[in-house]
């Protein structure tokens, strides 16, 4: 039979533009493997909604493999013991997988797999699938240009001929119950393609404007995030579809372009950000638990009651509570409101970002450690290199939900309060509605928080650390802009 080529599917549940599949199919018989890891799914940032979405994407991959005449081998347990079992069964094996920038848990699991392969003389080939780089130059010099090159290089077609090999599969355990979720995005390759196509041709014209609000953002944002997390389409496929659409628009009548070109440029910028943020976690895997500037970790205090009120959307700040309840029900909210929710936890409630970050992660169907933890750190003011941005819940409510309808819908206790008054309640109104009074005084709480953060920022030793962080993780684009405008 020759060497069995195991393609270990992780967060890349597709056959097209899949370098491990292409290489494995070239070399010999292919055994497609997915390992469901119960320990991973029991981590506090994992949730039933993420699991359900992943299973949808997995089912789509499975049916694509069946369509091509193969069978997906599904196993439950620890990857190393499953690989060891397959090696006992088939003798000579080689493993192919994509590089993964994930939790500390998956980082350590991958190290264990590499060590096992080395010890057992099993060839383990890992391939890039994003613009995220592993090893090599540890600064960001030239990174953005290499990202462009990666996205512009040819996407791989599905391998034309595959000699499939099967093996026994396990039955997946039931998903964790997730009672707050009322709606789940459709998963799988077809859903990913349809979502992108409807964004590029129909929903995305006002993306730049729509993305600020949860109301218009629900339709006007691309909504491709969970598909990117589980890899039903590659980022390169998404990038190239976007660039092709831009070329078609440019070739067509100018009056039909509207806001499309600007919006799609902005979307491409967000794809770039995906990798820019994930690169930080790739370079420093402990960022999910330690502040970039560790001294900030001693500042904030754990508070179970505050955290509970935050998580249940009962803080007494109507727009914050509406956003949290909307997120809990839908598994998604727009970028600006994610930033506001972190700002509220980290400045108003003065909670450690590690705790509030886990609450949010569980609610996100698109939880992606590579984006999430660097973003949570940035919005909490602990990186030393980003502007400290404190969001006012009242201002955000007035700006992003000017009619107040969104807030009344998600905080029905306040449904009798008309118009924008819902954003700035008096105590009497709140008490009459049975709605909690504000958990903190926003002005006083955030003044205290800023004072604490800025007094650390002024520390000369921390300024040195911040300069090193800028060198390691900072975007060169911003530096170039600064140099040009100087
Ligand atoms: C505190 C915080 C936590 C976040 N956690 C996650 C997370 O766990 N998973 C996740 O996918 N996104 C996360 N984001 C980024 C962003 O909010 C979501 O990607 C976006 O809202 C998803 O919706 P969309 O696909 O319609 O986005 P679009 O606006 O259509 O963007 C397209 C894609 O670009 C990437 N992207 C967009 N905005 C950002 C950004 N600010 N930083 C990095 N990449 C970006 C995402 O992959 C996204 O799917 C977080 C943002 C904040 C402020």
Image (cartoon, rainbow, N blue to C red):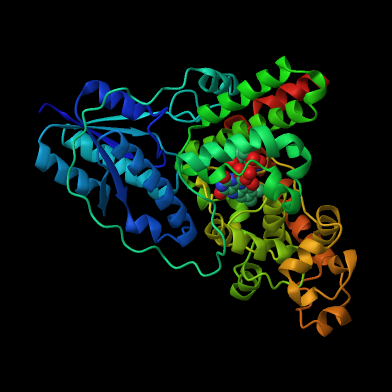
Name the side, left or right, on which 421 lies relative to 154.
right
Can you give x and y, in whole percent of width and height, for residue 231 in the image? Answer: 45, 39
450 left or right of 130 in image: right
Image quadrant in which you'd find residue 18: top left
Residue 472 located left or right of residue 408: left
Q: Where residue 333 appears, x then y in whole percent?
A: 65, 53
The structure residue drawn at horizontal position 32% and vertical position 52%, both measured from the top left corner, is 36
Where is ligand 1, by quadrant?
A: top right
| Percent x, y of residue 310 | 65, 68
Q: Residue at x 46, y 61 (%)?
A: 48
Q: Residue at x 16, y 42 (%)?
A: 86
- Of 203 and 238, nearer the camera is 203
Q: Quadrant of the C terminus?
A: top right
Q: Please, is residue 293 above or below residue 440 in the view? A: above
Left or right of 452: which side holds 163? Answer: left
Q: Position of residue 136 (x, y in %)?
A: 45, 23
Q: Quadrant of residue 422?
A: bottom right
Q: Quadrant of the N terminus?
A: top left
Residue 335 visible in image? no
Q: Residue furthest top?
A: 251
State the residue at coordinates (58%, 58%): 360
* Residue 447 versus residue 305 in the image, above or below: above
Task: Give the camera-side residue of 52 and 10.
Answer: 52
Q: Is residue 384 above or below residue 312?
A: above
Q: Is residue 298 visible?
A: yes
Between 385 and 83, which is closer to the camera in this rendering? 83
């Amino acid at each position: 039979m020759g060497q069995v080529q195991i393609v270990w599917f992780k967060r890349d549940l597709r056959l097209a533009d899949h370098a491990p599949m292409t290489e494995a199919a070239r070399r010999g018989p292919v055994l497609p493997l997915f390992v469901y890891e119960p320990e991973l799914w029991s981590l506090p940032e994992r949730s039933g909604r993420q699991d359900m979405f992943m299973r949808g994407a997995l089912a789509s991959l499975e049916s694509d493999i069946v369509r091509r005449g193969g069978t997906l081998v599904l196993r439950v347990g620890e990857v190393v013991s499953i690989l060891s079992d397959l090696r006992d069964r088939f003798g000579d094996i080689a493993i192919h997988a994509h590089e993964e920038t994930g939790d500390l848990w998956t980082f350590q699991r991958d190290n264990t797999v590499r060590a096992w392969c080395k010890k057992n003389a099993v060839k383990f080939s890992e391939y890039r699938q994003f613009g995220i780089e592993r090893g090599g130059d540890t600064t960001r010099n030239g990174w953005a240009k290499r990202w462009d090159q990666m996205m512009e290089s040819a996407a791989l077609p599905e391998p034309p001929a595959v000699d499939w090999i099967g093996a026994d599969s396990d039955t997946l355990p039931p998903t964790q119950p997730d009672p707050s979720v009322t709606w789940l995005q459709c998963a799988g390759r077809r859903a990913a393609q349809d979502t992108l196509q409807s964004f590029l041709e129909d929903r995305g014209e006002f993306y730049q404007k729509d993305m600020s609000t949860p109301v218009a953002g629900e339709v006007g944002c691309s909504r491709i995030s969970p598909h990117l997390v589980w890899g039903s389409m590659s980022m390169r496929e998404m990038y190239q579809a976007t660039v092709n659409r831009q070329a078609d628009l440019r070739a067509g009548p100018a009056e039909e372009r509207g806001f499309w070109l600007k919006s799609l440029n902005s979307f491409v910028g967000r794809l770039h950000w995906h990798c820019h943020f994930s690169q930080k976690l790739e370079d420093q895997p402990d960022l999910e638990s330690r502040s970039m500037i560790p001294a900030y970790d001693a500042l904030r205090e754990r508070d179970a009651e505050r955290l509970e009120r935050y998580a249940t959307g009962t803080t007494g700040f109507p727009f914050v509570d509406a956003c949290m309840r909307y997120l809990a029900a839908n598994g998604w909210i727009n970028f600006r409101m994610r930033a506001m929710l972190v700002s509220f936890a980290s400045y108003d409630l003065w909670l450690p970002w590690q705790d509030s970050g886990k609450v949010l992660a569980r609610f996100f169907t698109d939880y992606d450690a590579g984006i999430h933890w660097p973003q949570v750190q940035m919005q909490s003011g602990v990186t030393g290199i980003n502007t400290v941005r404190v969001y006012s819940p009242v201002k955000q409510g007035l700006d992003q939900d000017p009619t107040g309808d969104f807030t009344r819908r998600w905080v029905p206790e306040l449904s009798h309060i008309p118009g924008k008054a819902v954003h700035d309640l008096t105590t009497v109104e709140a008490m009459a509605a049975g709605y909690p009074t504000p958990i903190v005084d926003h002005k006083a709480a955030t003044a205290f928080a800023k004072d604490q953060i800025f007094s650390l920022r002024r520390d000369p030793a921390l300024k040195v650390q911040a300069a090193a962080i800028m060198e390691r993780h900072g975007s060169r684009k911003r530096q170039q802009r600064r140099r040009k405008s100087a």
